[in-house]
Structure formats: C-alpha cells, structure tokens
Image (cartoon, helix red, strand yellow):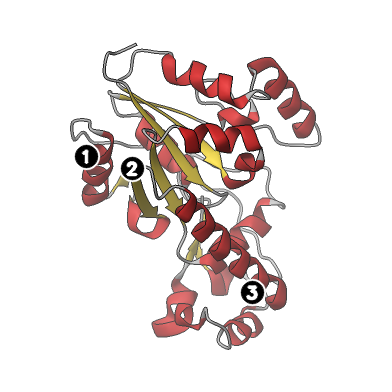
C-alpha cells in the first residue's frame, strides 16, 4: 500500500451516470475505482447481475466477499492494491445498512464524490425503462422503447429523490465533498475537460484524460420516449419542477445511463 493512500467513495443512486463515472475514474493510472462493494462486487469491475436469479447471485456475492460485515470489507479494500487512490461506488440504499454508514461517517478522511442528476424526471423515466430492458449499460446502440409514465407517481418519485439527495449531502458535510451532476459531466465518451480537472484535483492526482466504453442507452428526447408526454408535461408544469419545462428543457432532456 502506498504511504499516502487517498480513500474515496462515489455516492449516488441509480441512473445518474455512475457507471460511466466509475469507468472514467478507473481509467486514470493513479486511481482504482471498484463497483458496488457493499452489494458483494469484487475489487475488479464486473457487470451487476440481471434476470430472475439476480437476488440469489447478489446474496451469494455478499456472503462470499464479506460485504455483510461492511466495516471489515471496506477496510480491506482501502488497504489493498497499489494505486494511490482507492474509490468505490455506494448507492443510497446500501447505506441503509447501519455499519456501512457508520464506517463512512466515522472516517472523515474519506473523500466523497456526490453524484446526482438534475433532471429528476429523466431519471425517473430511465428507472422505469430499466425494468423493461435486459441491459443496464451498453457499448453500442440498443432497440428503442416507449413507456407510459403516471404523472402523480413521477412527481412523488422526484420529490423523494430530491429529499434523499439533500439528506445524504447533509450527512457528509464533515467530509471532503465534491458535488457533481450528470448533466455537467459528459462530452461524448469523455469527461468534460473542466470536470476532469476538478475530479483529479479533488483526489490529488495528476490531470490525465479519462474515458469509458459505455454509451448512452437511448439519446431520444422525453417527448419521443414517453407515450403520454403532453399529459405528463402538463402535470409537471403545476409543481416545483416546472422550471424543467422552461425553454423546452424537458422536451430536450435525454434519458441515459
């Protein structure tokens, strides 16, 4: 282990571009970034399980990896390897396990990259589409899908997502904290130059280009994806999320990773 090891965590929730960012970070020569260690994934990046056996596979991985004792699993991970920076991805739901959250809160030296998605409606639609797709990420274009979105359920989901983000942001105010948004990060298959520099500086590594093989699953607008788009837009326009509609922002929003 290097004498000066930087410990970091990518804190997020599904469909925020976190898989992109994990691969970006791991492509840096001084950074090792793992996936969801708290769900039993190994130190090396692998795809999460899908299909009817996914919960059984996930449970077996948690038992085998020691993730059921998160404080020991995380300490083992942070002490391992040779990279100056060790980072992993933690989802909000995984931190509902008290020992996992306690470990991170007790170790205030851990640097927190908090990733969110500003367009909460795009995120909600992406979560709905995930239930209809076999792929969570892809390296090439996939068949397009359409979906009906219940306006009331969408608004409730957006409010819950906003509340959860603010909750975890407050929880980690005592840590070195870098807040990022999906919308500000990406320039094709690369991190935007400014974002790449910010992340490298935050983690204390040399500024190097980073990239990922993952592409956006479906670059179409919400108008093309949502079969009842007009009704959905009308409902959203009467809420605190109405600003998403300003200047056609909602219509142009892209649903992806």
Residue 143 visible somewhere in the drawing: yes
**Residue sitting at 57 percent across and 19 percent down?**
72
Determine whether label 1 and label 2 are within 8 Å by CB. Answer: no
Residue located beneath label 1 in the image: 201
Percent position of residue 232, x then y: 63, 80
**Residue sitting at 47 percent across and 82 percent down?**
245
Q: Is residue 72 above or below residue 154?
A: above
Residue located beneath label 3 in the image: 155
Percent position of residue 149, x then y: 69, 71
User: Could you tell me which secondary element the residue under label 1 belongs to?
Assistant: helix
**Residue sitting at 30 percent across and 46 percent down?**
191
Residue in the foreground of this view, choosing between 62 and 249: 62
The tag on residue 176 is: 2
Residue in the foreground of this view, choosing between 176 and 230: 176
User: Could you tell me which secondary element the residue under label 3 belongs to?
Assistant: helix
Q: Earlier in the sequence, mark 3 or mark 2?
A: 3
Specify few, some or many for label 2: CA neighbours under 10 Å numbering under 14, 14-19, or 20 or more. Answer: some
* Left or right: where 227 falls relative to 90: right
* Left or right: where 104 falls relative to 144: left
């Amino acid at each position: 282990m290097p004498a000066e090891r930087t410990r970091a965590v990518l804190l997020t929730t599904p469909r925020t571009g976190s898989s992109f960012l994990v691969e970006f970070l791991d492509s840096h020569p001084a950074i090792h970034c793992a996936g969801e260690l708290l769900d039993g994934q190994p130190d090396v990046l692998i795809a999460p399980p899908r299909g009817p056996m996914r919960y059984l596979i996930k449970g077996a991985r948690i038992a085998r990896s020691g993730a059921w004792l998160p404080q020991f699993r995380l300490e083992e991970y942070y002490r391992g390897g040779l990279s100056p920076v060790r980072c992993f991805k933690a989802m909000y739901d995984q931190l509902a396990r008290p020992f996992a959250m306690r470990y991170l809160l007790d170790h205030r030296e851990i640097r927190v990259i908090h990733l969110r998605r500003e367009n909460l409606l795009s995120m909600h639609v992406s979560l709905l589409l995930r239930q209809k797709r076999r792929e969570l990420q892809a390296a090439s274009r996939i068949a397009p899908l359409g979906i009906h979105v219940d306006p009331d359920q969408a608004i409730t989901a957006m409010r819950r997502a906003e509340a959860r983000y603010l909750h975890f942001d407050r929880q980690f105010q005592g840590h070195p904290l870098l807040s990022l948004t999906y919308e500000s990060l990406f320039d094709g298959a690369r991190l935007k130059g400014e974002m790449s520099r910010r992340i490298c500086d935050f983690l204390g590594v040399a500024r190097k280009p980073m990239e990922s093989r993952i592409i956006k699953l479906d670059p179409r607008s919400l108008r093309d994806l949502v079969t009842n788009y007009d009704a959905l837009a009308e409902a959203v326009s009467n809420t605190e999320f109405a600003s998403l509609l300003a200047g056609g922002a909602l219509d142009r929003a892209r649903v992806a990773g």
